[in-house]
Image (tube, helix red, strand yellow):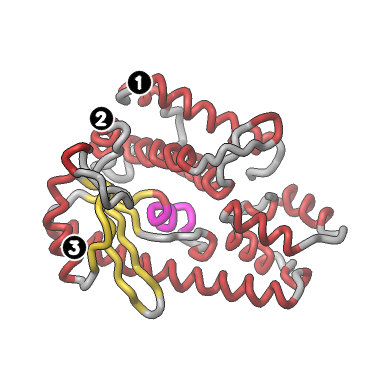
Amino acid sequence: MLLSNPILDKITLKRIEHILKHPIDWCKVFHISLRERTTFIICKNLLHYHYFWLVPDYLGVVWNTAYVGNIKKNKQLLYYYNILQKTFSRKGIAAFPGNGVMLLCSVYQDMLGVRLLHDIDFFTEKNYLPIIDEILFGLDFKKIYFNDKDLLINTSEIYGYDVLYSKYVNFTYINCDFCSCIKENPGLYTFLIDYMKNQNTIDYYFAQLVMLYLSVLKSWDGDYYFQNIKHYTYSKLIDLHLYKKIYITSDVKYLLNKIPNVASLIEKIQDVEECLNFFKKEGYLT
C-alpha cells in the first residue's frame, strides 16, 4: 500500500525502507497489486527509488515489461484522445473526458505509465451522438455495442445510452466509450454535464470530482478493510485523493445542495470520505 502512492514523501520512504529490510514475498505483493490495480504505480516506484533489484528476476522481467507496455498503450490512447478533442472542438461538440483519460491529462500527466486505462471515456449529450458516430466512422473505428454492454435492452426504456467504438492499432485496441446518461439518475448526469461546460473552473473540477466519487462507488466489491471500512479498489481512492489534493483548493460541498437527489449522494460521498480519511490517518496516502 505504501508503494502504491504515485508521489512518496520522506516519511513514507523511510517506512518503506524499514519494511524492505525484512524478507518480502514479492509474488504476493504482485498479486495484491493486480487486485487493487496498482501494479504499474508500484513498478514505477520500485524503479525510480532503486528498489527493483530486490524483485526476483523471473517476476521482474514480467513486471517491467508490462509497465513499459502500459506506457506505450497510454501514449496511443492519448494520441487518439487529442485527435478527437480537436475534432469535437472544431465541430462544436461538447464532449468531456472522464475518469482515466481525464486523470492522465491532469494528475498523472508526468507519469503516464502508472494508470491502467482500458478506454477513452467521454461524457456527452445524446443529441451529439449521431455526428460523433460519423466522426468515429471516418477514423476507421467500429461501433461495438450500445447501452453499457447489455445488447438486449430496449433503448426506449432508458434515458440515453452508452456507445463503445474500437480500433486495432499496433497490436493495441483503442476503445472510445461515450456515455450520454447516468441510467440510475438522468437528472444528476444533466447537472454534471452543465457544470463541465466551463473547463478550468471550480464548477468543472467539482463535477469531475463527483464523477470520480461515483467511479469509486462502482468499484466497491463488498469486502472490508480494517474497522469495517468498505473496500474500494485502492487505485480509485488514490485517483480521488490526488485529484482533491491538486484541484479542489476550497470546500466545494456546498455545491452538493444543488444536485438532484442530494441526500443519497452526500451519504455515499461521506462513506467514501471516511475511507479516504482512514488511509490518510494511517499514512497510506501522502
Is the residue marked by circle 1 packed among few (<14), some (14-19), or many (20+) residues within 10 Å?
Answer: few
Give the residue pinned by disc 3: 87
Residue 238 spot, x, y in % from top left: 56, 46
Quadrant containing the C terminus is: top right
Residue 4 spot, x, y in % from top left: 64, 53
Report the residue that reaches farthest toward the front: 152
- CA gap, disc 1 to disc 2? 14 Å
Q: Secondary structure at mark 3?
A: helix
Would you identify the image quadrant in which residue 231 lies? top right
Would you identify the image quadrant in which residue 55 lies? bottom right
Tell me which numbered mark, 3 or 2, is placed earlier along the sequence.
Answer: 3
Left-right relation of 139 to 33 = left
Q: Secondary structure at mark 2?
A: helix
Residue 168 spot, x, y in % from top left: 33, 74
Give the residue pinned by disc 2: 187
Give the residue pinned by disc 1: 257
